[in-house]
Image (spheres, grey):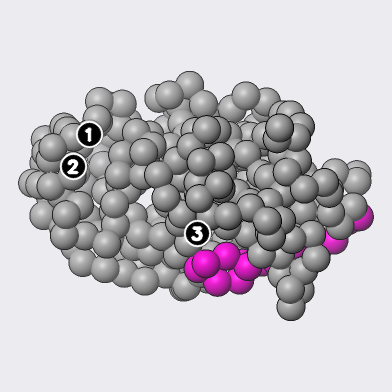
Amino acid sequence: MQERSFYILDVFAEEKYAGNQLAVLMAGQKMSDAEMQKIAKEFNYSETTFILSDTPEDEGYNICIFTPEKEIPFAGHPTLGTAYVIQKEIIKEPVDTVFLNLKAGRIPVKLVYKGKEADQLVMRQPEPVFGKTLDKNEVAKAISLDRSEIDGRFPVEEVSTGMWFIIVPLKTLNSIKRAKTDRDRYFKLIENTGAKAIVLFSPETYRKENHLNVRVFAGYYGIPEDPATGSGCGCLAAYLVKHRYFGKDSINVRIEQGYEIKRPSLLFLEAEGKTIYVGGKVIEIAKGNLL
């Protein structure tokens, strides 16, 4: 793989030009953190990943993930998309698992093939950690909704599987559609939280075959709204199991996201106890080299 080559991908997409866009670059050891940050800002996707070497270290490939604003320890769709590029462009033969070394730890990504092409990728999330519960009145104000639209059976809670999110259970799809961040109240809400991004979810969906609709706001990271969020949905999976949202200690569900911003996405979640898997499709859109 040539140093400074890049790939543009759609992750968690059922077809081209859907899901969450991602740029994956071969950085090599010569690219500094400052240069990687500038490139991530130039691409201006929710995240951009950098492969630091085409040689694995202790079986895992070292990668960094940057938003347009900062480096982050873990994110879902960059992990899947980068594993796809490593298998296709570096390993160049079918393998069952690609290991990635991130700041949050080592993440295994399993690959399921259709012929010689990886058709679906599945990652095991780091073990979830649960934070504090938040005041529903303050959360409702931050997302421009009434408190009554939050499902009172369940808490609003911080969860992390490598990156912290605030999980907010809503009653209806109508509430999902109408939600929007009140900038001042949003930043006031996250002043005293580890989580800076908000995951809203509803049992009502656009497509009947899906189980939940999800919407994610992450203005703190320079991303007003994320069309597909593997790490956020991994946190949601942990939340669903902990609070027995579906009445049991395990889940196997389809999640739709990104419909409100015309980037429809599909994520598959499986969880039992603290073991969580997030999966989806990766589609290559373009490739080239940095000047």
How far apart marks 1 and 2 lie (CA) works out to 6 Å
Q: Up-down: is 242 above or below 114?
A: below
Alpha-carbon neighbours of circle 1 within 10 Å: few (<14), some, or many (≥20)? many
Q: Residue at x 48, y 61 (%)?
A: 73
Q: Nearer the viewer, mark 1 or mark 3?
A: 3
Q: Disc 2 residue type?
A: Tyr
Q: Quadrant of the C terminus?
A: top right
Q: Disc 3 residue type?
A: Phe
Q: Are marks 2 and 3 in contact (CB under 8 Å)?
A: no
Identify the residue at the far bottom of this view. 58
Percent position (x, y) of residue 167? 30, 52
Identify the residue at the far left of this view. 137
Q: Is residue 81 magenta?
A: no
SS type, badge 3: loop
Q: Is residue 99 magenta?
A: yes
Q: Up-down: is 249 above or below 27?
A: below
Residue pointed to by mark 3: 74
Residue 107, disc: none
Q: Say left or right for 139 vs 213.
A: left
Percent position (x, y) of residue 95? 85, 61
Task: State which quadrant residue 62 falls in.
Answer: bottom right
Residue pointed to by mark 2: 186
For marks 1 and 2, the one nearer the N-term is 1
Q: Up-down: is 266 above or below 236?
A: above
SS type, badge 1: loop
